[in-house]
Amino acid sequence: MKEKIRIASGQGFWGDLVDAPYTQVTAGPIDYLVMDYLAEVTMSILQKQKNKNPKLGYARDIPELMERILPVCIEKNIKIITNGGGVNPEACAEAIMEVAKKLSIKKMKIAVVVGDNIKDNIDEIISAGCNLNNMETGESIVKVKDSLLSANVYFGAMPIVESLKLGADIVITGRTTDTGLTLAPMIYEFGWKETDYDLLSAGTIGGHILECGGQASGGNFLGDWQSVPDLVKIGFPIAEAYPNGEMVITKHDSLGGKVSFETIAEQLVYEIGDPKNYITPDCVADFTTVHLEELEPNRVKVFGIKGFEATEFYKVSCSYSSGYTSSGSLTYSWPQALTKAKVADKILRGRLRNLDLKFDEIRSELIGYNACHGPLATELKEDNINEVMLRVSVRGDDFKSVERFGKEIAPLILTGPPSVTGFAGGRPKPSEVVAYWPALIPKKLVKPEVKIFEL
């Protein structure tokens, strides 16, 4: 058993800093690079891409990235774990194998975790007595079954652990929990058991700290953010993990950013729901037991964590088509910019009303004034804003109504208040609304599978 392992975060979402993974593997010693590419809406985007081309459906940044980091990772024996396989992890593995051949790499093993994509098995699952009821509304998935775009089970760390036991240099998964990517190497390296709930919870919380990349090392920091040094070269967080479940969160010394009690504490409360019951496929972690100790600059110890047995369910993330939306914007300038924008909005709504169009919702935002805080925005006593952007959006099931809305924005330029600019790109066009359907499925109805690709 190793004395410790160093697990580095390389991506917090698909679209994160392109150079972060390369920097993590070159700026200092690490044992694992974990990269989280997936969000709920990402799965539907990837599914659409796969529907158009069976060779797509994964994060397409990955092959190009691998050209840069594979030689380094092989030389330094750094293992790579990512859920960037999306809805087509096998195609992702094949693309990486092609990169390896191009680089004349002679020996490499990729493990692919499949089985999370249940979109084509919905009828079978319903027949087995699971209606995949919406966790928020209680409705059966039958209601939206014909409109489903994607349906993926959140697997945990164990299939990745199996992959590492099979000798994988790279593990590519589909919809795996963000925390499972980091927990898996701890289980594998330290021999933790499925019943070591405190240890599993510690690793899960370590994964939660790493999952958003630079958000734990000074990015998007709500505290004294101006004190964070050199965000130009921000260093993503690294978990220095120990067999007893304790961790030290740090970063490479040569990089910018900041790992402190405050940055880690802030990340800990990010999207956790009930802090005493953070439910994952591997365990239920108790965030109220977390202890933090700042050992020295950029080294924060995380310890004392307790946890409980996992539930008998996996979470399922489904997306479905739910009508159409369209947005258009105009910018009004001083004087009376805010007044002009408000009047323009009133005129537009009147014209839409006269056309008897069918919308489920019309939303107006005055960017620079109330777009972030809505009705809580401070009411201005005087209209002295230099400029304000009016953005109006509509949503509804009637395509023709949403399309017609797009023809009413540009006419405001010559038929509404003066001093308008900022109209570019042509008429806004309808785009499909992708809605979210969260559900639970008994673990016994789904089985992960590991496939090996090898040079």
Image (cartoon, helix red, strand yellow):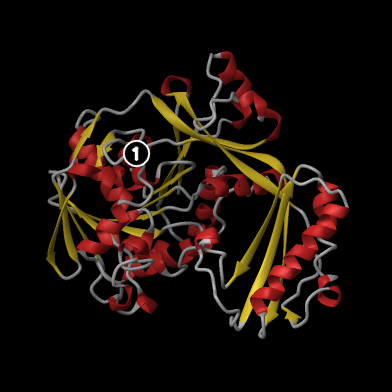
- The reply, left or right, for residue 357 in relation to residue 316 is right
Q: Quadrant of residue 54?
A: top right
Q: Quadrant of residue 201?
A: top left
In the picture as drawn, the residue positioned furthest to the front comes out as: 381
Residue, x 60% and y 79% (percent of image)?
383
Say whether residue 7 is visible: no
Say whether residue 270 is visible: yes
Of 149 and 262, the residue lying toward us? 262
Q: Is residue 52 above or below residue 9?
A: above
Q: Position of residue 327 (x, y in %)?
A: 71, 60
Please name the amino acid that badge 1 sits on: Ala
Q: Position of residue 56 (x, y in %)?
A: 63, 49
What residue is disc 1 on? 157
Residue, x 69% and y 40% (percent of image)?
321
- The reply, left or right, for residue 172 in relation to residue 133 is left
Quadrant housing the N terminus = top left
Residue, x 71% and y 75% (percent of image)?
340
Q: Position of residue 347 (x, y in %)?
A: 79, 65
